[in-house]
Image (cartoon, rainbow, N blue to C red):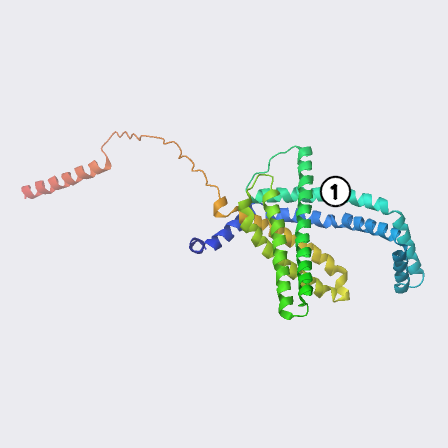
C-alpha cells in the first residue's frame, strides 16, 4: 500500500482523507447529525400540518373535499371519527404550529451545533471551549444562512428548468426528442450547480475556524456529484420499497434513516478529503533532538586484562617449550 500511495497521488489523497475521517471520529459525529436530522422531522411535520390547517380554514371547499374523501375511503364510524379528529386538529392549529416551531428550533440548533463541531474536527482544528450564548447565536445564524443557501439552490434548479421549458414552447420544440434531452441535461447541470453552492457554503462557512473559499471549490464540486449519485440511489430504493405494501410500512422510515446517515458520513468524508489536499496540509514541526548525555566509562582492574593474560600465557608456553628442548 505504501508503494501504491507513493506512485498514485489520488490514492494517497483518498487514504489521507480516510485517516483524517477515522482519527476525527467521523462515524460518531455522523450518528449525532443523523439523530438530530430525524428528530427535526416531527416538528417540521407539525409546522406543515399547522400551515395546512390555516389554508383549509381559509378555503372551506377544500376542507369539505378532504372530509368527503375521508368518508369515502373509510366509511362507517371510523370515517366519522377521523373527520372529528381533523376538525379538532384544525381548531388547535396555532398551538401545533407554536410547538412545532419550538421543537424545530431546538432540534435545528442541536443539528447545526453537531454539524459545525464535526466539520471543524475534519479540518483538523481542536475543539475549544466557547461561550454558550454567543455560540448559540452563531449556530442560529449559520442555520439561517444554510437555509438561504438551500433556497437559492432550489430556486436555481426550478427557475432554470422552467425557463428552459418556456423557451422550448416559444420555439415550438416541446415535442422534439433532442430538445427534451438537452433540457434534461440542463436540469442535471443546474442541479449540480445548486448542490455545489450548498456544499461550498457548508465546507467553508460552517466550520468554527475560518477556512478560505478557494480551499472548498474542488471539494464542493466532488460533493455535489456524489450527492446526486446518493439521491438517485435513494429514489431507486424508495420506489422499490413503496411498490410492496408490506415493506412500505417500515421501508420508508428505514430509508430515511439510512439516507440521512449516508449523507452525513459522505459530507464529513468530503470535508476530510478537502482538508487533506496538498495545499491545505500544514507542515509538521520538526522536533528538536534530545540533549546529548556524555557518560564516560572508567574501568579499573587490579590484574592484567584478559588480552594481556592470554599474551603472557602464550609467551610462557613458548619459553617452556624452548627450555625443554634445550635440556634434551
Q: Tell me if I can see residue 308 in this picture.
A: yes
Where is residue 40 shown, x and y percent of the image? 74, 48
Q: Quadrant of the C terminus?
A: top left
Q: Nearer the viewer, residue 312 or 154?
A: 154
x 64%, y 70%: residue? 177
Where is residue 257 shown, x and y percent of the image? 69, 54
Q: Quadrant of the N terminus?
A: bottom left
Where is residue 192 shown, x and y percent of the image? 61, 56
Q: Which residue is identified by label 1?
A: 105
Q: Tell me if I can see residue 229 in this picture.
A: no
Q: Along the horizontal axis of the image, is 192 left or right of 291?
A: right
Q: How many marks?
A: 1
Q: Along the horizontal axis of the image, is 155 left or right of 278?
A: right
x 76%, y 62%: residue? 248
Where is residue 32 shown, x and y percent of the image? 67, 46
Q: Quadrant of residue 158?
A: bottom right
Q: Residues within 10 Å of mark 1 (few under 14, many from 20)?
A: some
Instruction: Identify the secondary structure beneath mark 1.
Output: helix
Up the image or down, 285 lies above or below 252; here it is: above
x 70%, y 47%: residue? 36
x 93%, y 58%: residue? 80
Q: Nearer the viewer, residue 73 or 323?
A: 73
Q: Along the horizontal axis of the image, is 116 left or right of 317?
A: right
Q: Quadrant of residue 117?
A: top right
Q: Nearer the viewer, residue 27 or 233?
A: 233
Amino acid at each position: 500500500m505504501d508503494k501504491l500511495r507513493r506512485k498514485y497521488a489520488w490514492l494517497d489523497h483518498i487514504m489521507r482523507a480516510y485517516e483524517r475521517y477515522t482519527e476525527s471520529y467521523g462515524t460518531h459525529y455522523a450518528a449525532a447529525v443523523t439523530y438530530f436530522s430525524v428528530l427535526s422531522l416531527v416538528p417540521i411535520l407539525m409546522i406543515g400540518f399547522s400551515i395546512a390547517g390555516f389554508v383549509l380554514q381559509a378555503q372551506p371547499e377544500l376542507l369539505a373535499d378532504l372530509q368527503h374523501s375521508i368518508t369515502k375511503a373509510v366509511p362507517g364510524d371510523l370515517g366519522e371519527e377521523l373527520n372529528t379528529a381533523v376538525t379538532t386538529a384544525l381548531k388547535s392549529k396555532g398551538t401545533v404550529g407554536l410547538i412545532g416551531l419550538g421543537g424545530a428550533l431546538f432540534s435545528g440548533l442541536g443539528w447545526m451545533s453537531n454539524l459545525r463541531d464535526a466539520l471543524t474536527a475534519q479540518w483538523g482544528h481542536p475543539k475549544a471551549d466557547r461561550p454558550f450564548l454567543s455560540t448559540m447565536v452563531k449556530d442560529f445564524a449559520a442555520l439561517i444562512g444554510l437555509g438561504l443557501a438551500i433556497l437559492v439552490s432550489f430556486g436555481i434548479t426550478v427557475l432554470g428548468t422552467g425557463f428552459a421549458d418556456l423557451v422550448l414552447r416559444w420555439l415550438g420544440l416541446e415535442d422534439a426528442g433532442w430538445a427534451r434531452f438537452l433540457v434534461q441535461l440542463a436540469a442535471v447541470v443546474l442541479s449540480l450547480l445548486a448542490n455545489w453552492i450548498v456544499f461550498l457554503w457548508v465546507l467553508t462557512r460552517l466550520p468554527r475556524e475560518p477556512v478560505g473559499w478557494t480551499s472548498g471549490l474542488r471539494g464542493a464540486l466532488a460533493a455535489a456529484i456524489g450527492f446526486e449519485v446518493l439521491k438517485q440511489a435513494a429514489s431507486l430504493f424508495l420506489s422499490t420499497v413503496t411498490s410492496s405494501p408490506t415493506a412500505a410500512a417500515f421501508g420508508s422510515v428505514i430509508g430515511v434513516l439510512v439516507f440521512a446517515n449516508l449523507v452525513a458520513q459522505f459530507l464529513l468524508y468530503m470535508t476530510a478529503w478537502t482538508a487533506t489536499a496538498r495545499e491545505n496540509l500544514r507542515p509538521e514541526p520538526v522536533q528538536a533532538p534530545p540533549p546529548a548525555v556524555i557518560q564516560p566509562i572508567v574501568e579499573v582492574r587490579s590484574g592484567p586484562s584478559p588480552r594481556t593474560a592470554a599474551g603472557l600465557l602464550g609467551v610462557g608456553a613458548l619459553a617452556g617449550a624452548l627450555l625443554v628442548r634445550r635440556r634434551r
